[in-house]
Image (tube, coloured by chain):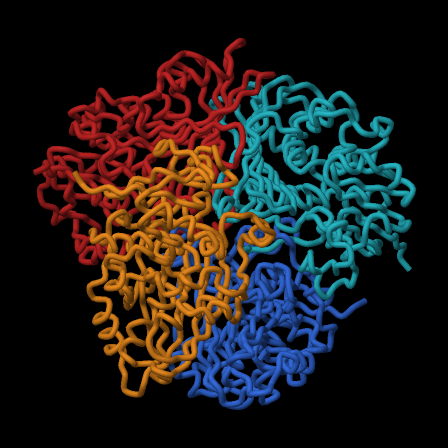
Chain colours: A red, B blue, C orange, D cyan
Amino acid sequence: MSERLTVGIVGGSGYAGGEFLRLAMGHPHLDVTQVTSERSAGVPVHMVHPNLRGRTSLKFRKAADLEAVDVLVLALPHGSAAKRIAEFEGKARIIVDLSADFRLRDGEAYRKYYGEDHPAPEQLGRWVYGNPELRRADLRGATRIACAGCFATSVILALYPLIKLGVIEGRDIVATGLVGSSAAGASATEASHHPEREGSLRVYKPVGHRHAAEAAQELPGRFPLHLTAISTPRVRGILTTASVWVPDGYSERDVWGAYREVYGEEPFIRIVKAARGIHRYPDPKLLDGTNFCDIGFEMDVDTGRVVVMSAIDNLVKGTAGHAMQSLNIAQGWEETLGLEFMGLHPA
Amino acid sequence: MSERLTVGIVGGSGYAGGEFLRLAMGHPHLDVTQVTSERSAGVPVHMVHPNLRGRTSLKFRKAADLEAVDVLVLALPHGSAAKRIAEFEGKARIIVDLSADFRLRDGEAYRKYYGEDHPAPEQLGRWVYGNPELRRADLRGATRIACAGCFATSVILALYPLIKLGVIEGRDIVATGLVGSSAAGASATEASHHPEREGSLRVYKPVGHRHAAEAAQELPGRFPLHLTAISTPRVRGILTTASVWVPDGYSERDVWGAYREVYGEEPFIRIVKAARGIHRYPDPKLLDGTNFCDIGFEMDVDTGRVVVMSAIDNLVKGTAGHAMQSLNIAQGWEETLGLEFMGLHPA
Amino acid sequence: MSERLTVGIVGGSGYAGGEFLRLAMGHPHLDVTQVTSERSAGVPVHMVHPNLRGRTSLKFRKAADLEAVDVLVLALPHGSAAKRIAEFEGKARIIVDLSADFRLRDGEAYRKYYGEDHPAPEQLGRWVYGNPELRRADLRGATRIACAGCFATSVILALYPLIKLGVIEGRDIVATGLVGSSAAGASATEASHHPEREGSLRVYKPVGHRHAAEAAQELPGRFPLHLTAISTPRVRGILTTASVWVPDGYSERDVWGAYREVYGEEPFIRIVKAARGIHRYPDPKLLDGTNFCDIGFEMDVDTGRVVVMSAIDNLVKGTAGHAMQSLNIAQGWEETLGLEFMGLHPA
Amino acid sequence: MSERLTVGIVGGSGYAGGEFLRLAMGHPHLDVTQVTSERSAGVPVHMVHPNLRGRTSLKFRKAADLEAVDVLVLALPHGSAAKRIAEFEGKARIIVDLSADFRLRDGEAYRKYYGEDHPAPEQLGRWVYGNPELRRADLRGATRIACAGCFATSVILALYPLIKLGVIEGRDIVATGLVGSSAAGASATEASHHPEREGSLRVYKPVGHRHAAEAAQELPGRFPLHLTAISTPRVRGILTTASVWVPDGYSERDVWGAYREVYGEEPFIRIVKAARGIHRYPDPKLLDGTNFCDIGFEMDVDTGRVVVMSAIDNLVKGTAGHAMQSLNIAQGWEETLGLEFMGLHPA
C-alpha cells in the first residue's frame, strides 16, 4: 500500500486551485478530500471545472467548514493567505501557498512591490521558495512551500545558468513576457471580455512588474533586470524572450555548455534549439497542461547578444505543477508524480 | 451644400450604438452631435470606442441631458426603449430603434417571446421593420424604424426568395446560426470571460430563439421554422445554414433563378457560390465592418434538400448598417451612403 | 510482468498516427517500436511531434523497412491501406486501420461515396467497425479493426439511443457538424493557410458528406440523414447538433431515459445537460486530448424537435482514442487504458 | 473633373498587392486598370481577393501582357523587382515598389542582409524611401518610391523622435516585434498550416532581422539596435515594444514633449497613453485596415528605461497604406486620400 496524504484546497474555484486539483487526481499519494469556495459552496466541483465531470463527486464547501488534512493548498488572491495563515496552520502540517504572499523573504521588498506592509511579517523567511531547479535541496522535507510566480519562473529559469556561472554578471537584462489570459484569473472583467480580448496584443505591464522582486531575490549576483509583460490571445502559456550580453569570446557552444551543465539532469527542462523546422524554439502552444519549461537561445555574434527564450504553461510549471513538483521533492517522492502529461500536438 | 441632419445616439457606449456612430461619421448627411451613456457620462467617446480616437472629440453625456436632434438612434437594452419612448419622441422627429422593442407588431407574440406584456402597446404597428430587402417600400418616408434582429436578418435573407416564390411552402426549415461574441453585448460576464470563451463552441439557444418570432412575422406563408444558435470564437459575424426541401423537379438552376429574381438589384446582397476555391461559399470572416449579406446554397439532388447559407456582420448588416440603410431609404438618400467599406482580406 | 505487445505505426508523421503514438506511450501493454514516414524517414519522431520531445528517441523509417510487430496501426491517406493490405498482413497479427478503407462492408456503398471500386474487395466484411459503443461484442478478440470516422462517430453517438429504441424511426435527421482544422490532416494547403483559415467559418461540405455512409451502415432502421459540415477556427474538435423529431407524448424525461438506458455504463460518454451555467451543454473546447464523447440535448415541446448535441476531440474519440479503446476491448484489457487524460480547464 | 491616373499592379494576387488594390479602389485619383498574376492569370480578381466581390470585374493577366499605365505598383517577392526593373520602367512614369529591393541605398548593406549582390546596382540611390514621417520633403514629386518594410516602419516610427532629438544617442535599443501571419505572405507553408500556427507564439527571428538595415539607414546618429521578431496568432498587425534608456533627469514629460514636437502634425500617428482603461496603450487589434501608427510609452523612473510601443497594420501602414500615403505626397494630393478607414471596435 502506498502512502496517501489527504489534501484540502482553499480557494479551489479559481484556475490555480483547479489545476492543482486536476494534477492531484492523477497523483498516487494524494487524496483531495476538500475544496473550498465561498462563492460556489454547495456546488459540485465539476460545475466549475468541467474537465473533472465524471471524475469527482466533490462539492465546494466554505473555508469555515474546512477540516484537518495532511496538506493544505492555498489558492487565494494575493494578500489573503498571509492574513489568515494562523487559521490555516491549525489545519494541516504541510502548507503549499500558490499566491505571492510568502515568496519574498524581505519585508521591505514586499512593501515596495505590493504597496503595503506584510500582513504576517513573522512568517517571512519560514517558507521555501517553490522552485525545484534552484531550491531542490531546501525543498527536501519542507512543510511551507511558497510557489514561485509564473512570469518569475519563466524569467528565472531562462537566465539561471548564465547568472549562476557568472557569465552576465552586472549587465542589463531585457526580458519580454507574452502571457495568456488565464494568468489574470477566473473573474470576468472588462479586460477579459471576449470581444475586447480576442486577438489583442495588450501591453499590461511595460515596466515595474512585481515578479522582478522574485528574480532579484532568487538569482545570485547583481544585474539590472528590465521586464515588460504583454497579454496575448492565448488562454495558457508564457513565452519569455530575454536579451543578455555575453563577454567577448563567449561562444554559442559555451552557452550550450552552460545550460547543459546546470540543467542536464532536470526532469522538466528541455533545451529546444534546432537548426530548422517549425518547432526549433520553445513555444507555449505545445506545453498546455504540461510541467515542462522549454528553453532555447540564439546568439548574435556581431554584438554578443544572446536571446534566451523560455516557454511554460503558466498554470502548471508557472503555478500548480511547480507546486506539485516541489511537494514531491519535499515528501521524497518521485519528482514527476502527477506531472506525466506530455502535451498535445497539434493543439 | 448637402442636407445634414443632427443625430443623437442613446446608449452609445455599447457595441450597436458605437457601430452606428462609426458609420454615421462617414455619412455625408449625418452629424452626430450627442452620444449618451449613463455609465460613461463625461468620458470621451474614444475611450470606449478606441477606433474613433482622433476622429471625434465628443464626450458621453447622460440621457437626461439630451437635447433635441433630427434623428434619435436608440441603442438600449431590450425593454428600455419601449418604457421611455414618450420621452424620446419629444426629442426627435425621426427615431431609429436598434433593440427588439418595436419589431413585433403583435402584442401576443411579444408576450410569448419576451415573457411580459409590451411596455407601450399603443406603439405596436407604428414602426416599420427595418429590413430594406423586404420593406423597402414601407421604409420610404418612415420616421419610426425598428431595426431587424441580427440572427433574424441572417435567417430571413437566406430564406426570403424561396418563401416569397412559394417554393418551400409548408415545409420544415432547420436553421443553425453560428454567432460571434459581440452579439452578447459589451458587458463582461462569466460567459464572455476570455479563458472560457476563447475557442469554445457553445450551444446557447438550441431551441426557442426569440428571433423566430421576427421571421414568422416578416416572411409570408406558413412554415415550421426551427432555429439553433451556437456561439463561436469569432468576435463579429453570423453564419446561418438553413436546410429546406424543394419540390421534386425543382433544380439547382431554379434556385439560382429564385435568388436572382428576388435579389438581383439589391446593393448589399451577393450570391456567393463557386465550383472551387476556398471562398466558394459565404464566410462572415470576410464581412467584418461591411453591410453585405452574402448568400450561397448547395443542393442534394437525391433528397431535394437545399442548404442555404448566409453570412453577415451582426453589428452592421445585423444591426447598425441595416439601420443606416433603412434610414437612407427613409430619407430618399442613396442607399449605400456610409456603408461603402468593402471589408478586408486577409483578416 | 504485464503483457506487452509491440506496435508499428505506418504513416506516423500525420496527426492521426501521431495521436495514436502519444496514447500508446502511456499504455501499459503497448511498446511502439517502429514508426514509418516516407517523407520524414531518418528524422527523430519528436521533430514532427514536438510534444514527444524527451519522451522517445524513435526515428521515422520507411515503410519498406518495417519489421514484424504484434500490432500494426495504419495511418495512411484514404485508399492507401486497402491497396497495400496484403503487404501489411504479412507484418502483424493485429491490424488497426485509421483510414476509411475498411469501414464500409458494402462495395457499392464504397463506390458511391469514394468514387471508385474498392481496391481490395475480398477484405470487405472482414473488419470490425471500431465503435465500442455499438460494436463492443464484435470487437472482443478482433484482429482487424477499422476505426470509425470522426464526423460519423459524433453523429452516430449522438443519435444511437433514439434510433436503437425506435423513437425516431423513419423521420428526417438534420445534423450540422462544426469541425476543427486538424481534421483535414497535416499537409499545408491554401485552405489551411493561417491568414485564410484563422477566424473563418467555412462550409466545406453542405451536402453529401461521406460519413453519412457509415452512419447508414451502423445505425439500425431507416431514416433520412442530412449532414452539413462546417470548418471552424478550432484546431481540434467536433460539435454536432442534430435535429430530430420525437413522437407526440415523448417527453424530455423520456429522452433522458433513452440516453441513460443505452449509455449508462459507457466509460467515455457523459451526458452534459445542466439548467444553468456556462458549461451546460457539450463543448469540444473541454475535450482536447480526451476520449470523451459528451452528449446533451434540449427539447422544443411545441414542435417535438429534440436538438441532440455531441462533442468529441476528432483526433481522439474521433480517431486514435476510439481505435485504442477498440483495441483494448479486442485484447480484453481494461477499456480505459492509455485514455485516462481528463482534459484541461481553462484551455 | 479630378485628375485620374491609371494604375497597374504587378504581382497582385499577394496580400500586399491586394491591399494596395483595395485602397486604390477608394481613391478619387486612381483607376486600377491592370493587375497581374502569373499563377492566377485569367481568374477574376475577386476569386483571390474575395472582399472585392461585386466591386471590380478585373481579371488577372500575365505580366507579359502589361500595357503602359501612369503608375506601376510592384508587389513581387524580394529580388524580383530589381531583376526586371528595366522592363517595368518602360511601362510607367511612376513606380512604387513594395518589396525590399530598392530600400537600401548602399550595395554593401544589401549584400550583408540579403546575401547576394544587388541585381541592379545602378538603381541604388535613385529611389526615395517611402516613409512619409521621415522623408516627406524627399517624397514630393518623387517618381520612384521604395516602400518601407513593415517591421522597420514599426521600429523607426517608435524611435524617431527620441533619436532625432538626440536623447538616446549611442545607447542600446532592444526591440521586440510581435507580428501577424499575413506578414509571411499568401503562400501556404508548413509554418502557416493552421493546426500548427493557430495559437502559437513562435520566435522566428531572435537576432539578425533584415529590417535593422533599414532602421540603421534611415534613423540619424549611431545606436546599437537589437531586434527580435515573434509570430503571433493574429493575421494582421505588428506590436513593437522598444526599451531605450534616457539620460538622468529626462522625465516622462520630456518624452511626451519629444513625441508631440516631432509627430504633432502627422495625420496617421496617434499618441496612445492613458492612465487607465483597457485601451491605454497601442494595440494592433484596433488598427486592422487602417493606416495609423499608434505610439505609446511608459517610463521606469528608477532605471531611466522607457518602453516605447508602436502598433500598425503590417499590410497598411506597414506596406500598402504607407505606399499610398507616399504616393499622395509625391503627387501633391491630400495625404489621407484612400486611407480614411478608421478601423473597427470590437473586432
- Image position of B206 (left or right of B273): left
Name the image quarter holding residue D142. top right
- Image position of C47 (left or right of D148): left
Let me know if residue B238 appears in the view.
no
Name the image quarter holding residue C312. bottom left
Task: Say which quadrant the N terminus of chain B sits in.
Answer: bottom right
How many callouts does the rendering have? 0
- Image height check: is B225 above or below C215? below
Q: Residue at x 33, y 54 (%)?
A: C323
Q: Residue at x 69, y 33 (%)?
A: D261
- Image height check: is C125 above or below B248? above
- Image height check: is D153 above or below B266? above
Residue found farthest to the top: A249
Q: Residue at x 22, y 43 (%)?
A: A26
- Point out residue A232 in the picture as x, y percentages from the top left corner: 47, 43
- Point out residue A143 in the picture as x, y percentages from the top left corner: 16, 29
- Image position of C117 (left or right of D114): left
- Point out residue A128 in the picture as x, y percentages from the top left corner: 23, 25
Q: Nearer the viewer, residue D28 or D72?
A: D72
Let me know if residue D300 appears in the view.
yes
